[in-house]
Amino acid sequence: MILDSFQLHGRTALVTGASRGLGAAIAVALSEAGAAVVCHGNSTSPDRTAAAVEAGGGKAGTAIADLTDPSAPGRLFDQAISCFGAVDILVNNAGVIRRTPAIEYAEEDWADVLQVNLTAAFRLSQLTAEQMLARGAGGKILNLASLLAFQGGITVPAYAAAKGGLAQLTKALANEWASKSINVNAIAPGYMATDNTEALRRDETRSRQILERIPAGRWGTPDDVAGAAVFLCSDASRYVHGQILAIDGGWLGR
């Protein structure tokens, strides 16, 4: 049965940035498909997400690690292993955004955004793949890129650079690991109603301009991403490698 290939029973997932927004929706969706999920919070507790997983009959673990710290990915991975013994699915969702005109962009902000959005994702992917290869079990790595992997954005130079880099990293890792039964893919969300876009949604002019450009005529929601995440983390996508799937209400086709 084709539907069986979407099931994740017996697998464990680590979802970074799962306290709210896209990460929380993905964590709950993976659990509904059968996975045990380690919910990570960068600075905010993921307890609410873990509670939602458990309320649905799933298994959840929690971990908090500030990914602006270069040593945090290693500690986070160790916490995930201690929860369920293995990581079969890694979702690199954690991200930060700092909005400032490029001429005024602070070096510290640049470093933090690149560290969380790109470098930490690479390090977690390394650690996860190393464990997958040692077990000979294969697995799934899903990165959360952005429309700004394709476009430059305005006043978000570090975010655009990091997400563009994450899209290319997705392809690079897929080239190396596809033959090892490790699928590395990415989702590129469009304009979603999350904390990262709160400033845009409060700006009446920019919000109107954005909505006018989206063929679907609305901002996306975290649930709009969840189904694609389950697909890319399941056996249904076993021959999908190095892809960047835009979930944007038609934005890029406009």
Image (cartoon, rainbow, N blue to C red):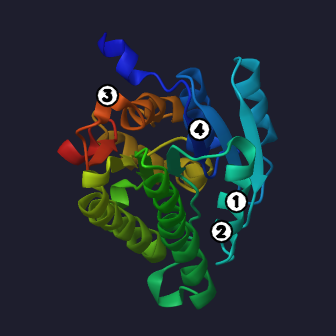
Q: Earlier in the sequence, mark 3 or mark 2?
A: 2
**12 above or below 195?**
above
Q: Residues within 10 Å of mark 4 (few under 14, many from 20)?
A: many
Quadrant location of the N terminus in the rendered image: top left
Percent position of residue 5, x then y: 36, 21
Q: Which mark is residue 158?
A: none
Which residue is located at x 75 percent, y 40 percent? 61
Q: Secondary structure at mark 1?
A: helix
In the rendered image, which residue does mark 1 sit on? 78
* Amino acid of disc 1: Asp
In the rendered image, which residue does mark 3 sit on? 236
Q: Secondary structure at mark 2?
A: helix
Q: Is residue 242 visible?
A: no
Tell me where residue 28 sits by quadrant: top right
In the rendered image, which residue does mark 2 sit on? 74
Cα–Cα gap, marks 3 and 2: 30 Å
**186 above or below 48?**
below
Q: Earlier in the sequence, mark 3 or mark 4?
A: 4
Q: Residues within 10 Å of mark 2 (few under 14, many from 20)?
A: some
